[in-house]
Amino acid sequence: MKHKRLLLILGCLMSVLLAGYVTLRLSAPRHRITADNIQAIRAGMTAKEVEEILGAPPGYYCSRKDEEVIAVIAPGCLEAPTTTMELERTSDRKFWVSDEGGIWIRLREDGKVATVIRLSVPNAEETFLAKLRRWLGM
């Protein structure tokens, strides 16, 4: 009887741990917009190559919903966008923004990257789930 109870407790504990892991995995970001990947983007690449490196189509992937936080841009860059509204206006310009940073590109007529501007996103307090995912390497 004692062994059955122990097996039941261990089974329940394993089920809870597995459910927690699956939940964290399913709620993890579906992109690779990281500082290292952003640094890998260079002029002359195609938009498709940029998408493959960053793992997602252009867009806003921050966990925060305040989309106006994106543009603390290198001073003196007159052609760079400052709000998501400006980012979305033209088809020859694309942007990717996550909690770790962002990138804005302008495409030439042949579809290759002409201009690369790296965006810095103001630091926000990391959520508990984000800390847990980082700790687990997810």
Image: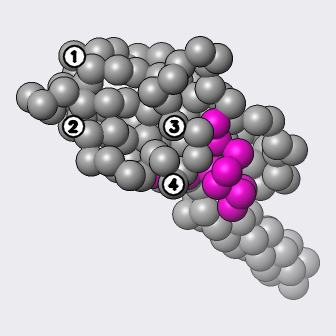
Of label 3 and label 1, which has the lower sequence position?
1
Please give the label number shown on residue 48.
2
Marks 4, 1: nearer the viewer: 4
Marks 2, 4: nearer the viewer: 4
Please give the label number shown on residue 44.
1
Q: Are the residues at dot 4 and dot 1 in contact (C-beta closer than 8 Å)?
A: no
User: What is the CA distance from the residue labelled 4 to the residue labelled 1?
Assistant: 26 Å
Of label 4 and label 1, which has the lower sequence position?
1
Q: Which element type, helix, strand or loop, lies under badge 2?
A: helix
Query: For the residue carrying disc 3, how many other residues have a C-alpha within 10 Å: few (<14), some (14-19), or many (20+)?
Result: many
Query: For the residue carrying disc 4, how many other residues have a C-alpha within 10 Å: few (<14), some (14-19), or many (20+)?
Result: few
- Name the residue that disc number 3 marks: 81
Query: For the residue carrying disc 1, how many other residues have a C-alpha within 10 Å: few (<14), some (14-19), or many (20+)?
Result: some
Q: Residue at x 79, y 69 (%)?
A: 13
In this view, the residue farthest toward the right is 2
Q: Position of residue 56 (x, y in %)?
A: 38, 47
- Name the residue that disc number 4 marks: 85
Q: Are the residues at dot 3 and dot 2 in contact (C-beta closer than 8 Å)?
A: no
Q: Taken as a whole, is the magenta stretch helix, strand or loop?
A: loop
Query: For the residue carrying disc 2, how many other residues have a C-alpha within 10 Å: few (<14), some (14-19), or many (20+)?
Result: few
Tell me the magenta residue range: 59-71
Q: Residue at x 63, y 36 (%)?
A: 71
Q: Is residue 132 above or below residue 43?
A: below
Badge 1 amino acid: Gly
Q: Residue at x 62, y 26 (%)?
A: 73
Front-lying residue, 4 or 37: 37
Q: Position of residue 54 (x, y in %)?
A: 40, 36
